[in-house]
Each structure stands twice: as C-alpha cells, then as structure tokens.
Amino acid sequence: MRSDLFPGYGARHGLPFLFAHSQPPGMTADQEGGGDEEEEADGGAHGLLRRHYLPSLPLDRVVPGHVLLRRGAISFGSCAALLGGTQPRLLSQRRGAISFDSSDQDAIYVRMLGDVKVRSQASQRRGSFPYVEVRLSLGGSASSGRECQRRRVRRLFSCQRYLHAGQLLNGRPRRPSLHMLDKDYVGQAKCMLLKVENWDFDTFLFERLTNGNELVTLTCHLFHKHDLLRHFDLDLVKLRRFLVMLQDDYHNQNPFHNAVHAADVTQAMNCYLKEPKLASHLTPWDVMVGLLAASAHDVDHPGVNQPFLVKTNHHLASLYQNNSVLEKHHWRSAVGMLRESRLFDHLPTDKRHQFETDLGSLILATDITRQNDYLSSFRSHLDSNDLSLANVKHRHLVLQIALKCADICNPCRMWNISKRWSERVCEEFFNQGDLEKKYNVDVSPLCDRSTQNVPNIQINFMTYVVEPLFVEWARFTGYTLLSRTMLAHMRLNKASWCSLQNQATPMAEGHRSDEDTDNDDEDEKVQLFSSL
Ligand SMILES: Nc1ncnc2c1ncn2[C@@H]1O[C@@H]2COP(=O)(O)O[C@H]2[C@H]1O
Ligand SMILES: [Zn+2]
C-alpha cells in the first residue's frame, strides 16, 4: 500500500477523507499531527492522567454546538460527552475529520463524512472521496465563504428543511429547468402516486417530478395511505423532518446507492407488504417498520463496499469489527436521525427501543454476504410448510426476506428501468475499481472495468443471487401475479443481457468474468457478489 493512503498525508494533500482516517503504521495520533501531549493531575485516585490534545490539521473544523447535541454523533454526542465526561477536543484518538473516544462504547453512530456544517459548505457534493477536493476548491473566495455562512444559518432553522426539502437548504443539487413547470410536475407526481402499488412505477421519473424529493414524498404518501400517522399519533412535521434528514444523508453522487434507490426499494417493499398472504397478517407496526427500514436501509452509503472499507482501514470498519459494517452504519445513522427528529418521543421507551431493534434487524438482513443464511432458513420453512404469520418471529423473518427482495429487485423491473439500475450499479463498482487502482490496492472482484462488462455481471447476479431468492418469494406468495411478473421480467432481462453480451467489450485474455464462477458451486458464486 502506498504511504499516501494514510492519514495526515491524505488530509494535507487533499486526498479523500476515506483515506484520511487512520495512522501510518508505527505512528501515534500525536506524532501524526504534531499534536501536544500533556500530563495533568486528575485530582483522583488515578494520579497523573495523560491527555492528548488533538492537533489541528488544515482540514480540521470546529464542531458547532448544535451538532454536538444532534444525533449523538460519535463520542461528541455520546454519553460520555453529554454527561460532562471527556471533552470532545480532548479525546484520545482522532480519525479523519472527527474526534472520538475509542473507549466509549455508547456512541450511537459515526457520521461518514464529518458534520452538517461541512456538508453545507460543499453543498453540491456528498460522499467520501471527491469531497475534500471540492472543499478545497470552494475554500478560496470571500463571497463563497459568506454564502456558506448564510446557508449554515438558514440550515439551523430546521423548519425550512422540510418546507423546502430537496432544494438549496439540504445540500442537494438544484435541478435545472423546472421553474414554471413546478405546478405541473407536482400534479404529475400526484398522479404517479395514485399508482404507487403498480410494479411498473418509475422511480427515476418520480424523482424528476418531485424535484429530487422522491424519498420524502413517497414515504409520506405511504404513511398516509396506511393510516400510520393516525394510528401512532405521529406528528406530520416531525415525520417530514426525519424523512428530509434521511433523504439528505443519501449521497446523490453515488450512481446507485442514492436516495432514488432508497425510494425504489421503499416502493417495492410497499408492493410486497400488499401481497395478500402477508397483508392479512401485518400489524400497523410491521408496516411502519417495513417502510422505514426500506427508506433508511442504505443511508449515508459511501459508494464503496465493505471490503474496500476494511482494506483501507476505514474507521467504520474498526468500529463495527469488519462485520456488516455498512448495514450497521445505515442502521445507527437512521436511529440517530429518528432520535433527533423526536418522531417517536411520545411513545413509551420500551416501544421506542423495540422499534430501533426491529429496524436494525431488517436493515442488517440486507447484508448480501448473509444472503444464503436467510435464504436457507426461509426455504426450510417453506419446505416444511410451518410458517405461521400469526407468530411475530415468523412475520419478522418474512419482512426481512421482503426487504431483501426489495433491495435487489431492480433486475425484476421492466427492461428500460432495470437496465438503468444495472448500468448504475456497475458504474459504482467500476468507480471503486478505479479508486483501488489509483491507490494501488487490490481491485475487488467485479470492479475492474478492463476485465468485466455489464452484461456479464448482470447475468451472473440474476442467476446466482436474484433468481434463487425470487423463486422462494414466489413460492411463499402462492405465485401471485406480482411474483410471476417479477420472475418473467427477470428472465426477459437476462435474455436481453445475453444478447448484449455478444456485443460487449471483450474481456482481456485470461480474465473472462465468468471464469471465476464456471466451476464453483452456487455458494461461492453468491460469495463473489457478496464481496460487493
Ligand atoms: N443489478 C445489479 N447487479 C449487480 N449487483 C447488484 C445489482 N443490484 C444490486 N446489486 C448488489 O446487491 C447488493 C445488495 O446490497 P447493497 O445495496 O449493499 O449493494 C448491492 C449491490 O452490490
Ligand atoms: Zn440497497
């Protein structure tokens, strides 16, 4: 690995934050940043206490007070800091933009990129690696500084966040050319919502018609439709505030893992919740957990996969011990936002905790590396015909499977929509591969654009990941029209990719992309995708 993958160096040279988080081997945090270290009497039985003052790196930033209070972000919002323990700036370690106390296990979550203040400065970009460069290029002019300051102030008025979701204030790129057409677009978006239960719902179009507010608009609509606001006595303002935060924390610049994907998965989840076999047993609680898990399941996704985070020693990988790293991060981020929004403040504590636990268990099920565990459990229940949906545990398993299906349902959409998702997901893989080459780390399977092609990736993904899951789902639903439609689309799409495969860029010699999969058993083929 090159030394410039490591912190300090990364931050100073404008390299991605993703790389600016750990220490070069053999170097302490203090050495790294030239920070001071001093010994203080703590006045207690411990005698002398060694404290590490964190260095101020060029890209370091002050964490504003309101951020300290919000979301329990890292240690600065975790119990130790809130209860008057260690001060954030005196914490024992730093990782990239953020300081944290590694001994504090109460942190709710760690933000991927730093804090809100920073994101509002680089309002056009979110995400890990292009991020620092954008910041640097914005850093120069006084007028841009003033504009950033203004934006930051406006952002504090959180009511504006939901009134003007998706625009200026929440850091999403403004979309050109709507202006006078806004009203027409809103009308058309409403029309689309009338058919929100149709499988041919086009989330890309919905994104345009809602001017980038697809996730907020769709989820709010579904909450109304399922009468969840009334049932749980929810405050609409708080719900919108939560959803705007959520939408805001998806990274628009990810070709695939962005808020449109979240909206797409939420729409699919709603279709599955409507399946008669399931719908008749679902409680409002199940519906609410299912919909919110779908909306939140990839929040703050950095556009690279877990192996990438592990091999670049990303702080999230160590925080979550290299295990379901991204999924845990999505879950904890969502919990942080839920708490900040106070959406469930009126519910009893045990209910709130129950909701957070259920949300986590659904989101963690989307970890594709665990696909076979869930699939075998589901299959064996179907084989023995012992699923009882009156049983809360069985219902929960079915909800997990439903969310898994929703997460990878893009190959089961109509060709013109499905193809766009396929191209986007491969673009994200290849972008990661480009980064890996650039920084001289192993290129992940399927991420090398010089040896892979889209049709081949799609055919394998459908054959070894999508089809086995949807076949079982169809069996569970009793081969409903929706299940048959999805399988039919998937098979047609696969045939289309097969015919396109012949025209695709030939693989480099010795690197046929199916080479790795030809002689392996199904499990290994799934694992190939699991590494994504
Ligand atoms: N069309 C697709 N082709 C290949 N991989 C996909 C496709 N759709 C989803 N995936 C992968 O499936 C994974 C499901 O979990 P993730 O959202 O973490 O990341 C997703 C992608 O890595
Ligand atoms: Zn997803």
Image (spheres, rainbow, N blue to C red):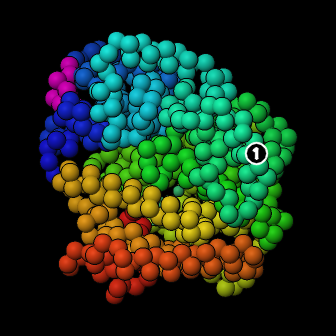
Q: Position of residue 456 (x, y in %)?
A: 39, 75
The one nearer the camera, 216 or 377, is 216
State which quarter of the image contains the C terminus: bottom left
Q: Image quarter for residue 142?
A: top left
Span shown in magenta: 28-36
Q: Residue sitting at 60 percent across and 35 percent down? A: 178
Residue 423 horizontal side relative to residue 504, left or right: right
Residue 234 higher or lower than 370, as above or below: above
Relative height, residue 383 to residue 87 (above, below): below
Mark 1 crowdedness (10 Å alpha carbons): few <14, some 14-19, many ≥20: some
Q: Which amino acid type is marked by label 1?
A: Lys
Residue beneath label 1, please?
A: 190
Report which quarter residue 529 is drawn in. bottom left
Residue 286 visible: no
Q: What residue is shown at x 20% (from left), y 30% (from top)?
A: 12
- Depth check, front residue: 208 or 310: 208
SS of the residue under disc 1: helix
| Residue drawn where x is 29% and y is 58% of the image | 433
Instruction: Classify residue 532 as left or right of residue 469.
Output: left
Compared to residue 284, the image places residue 49 above or below, namely above
Quick one: 204 or 146, which is closer to the camera? 204
Image position, residue 464 (x, y; %):
47, 78
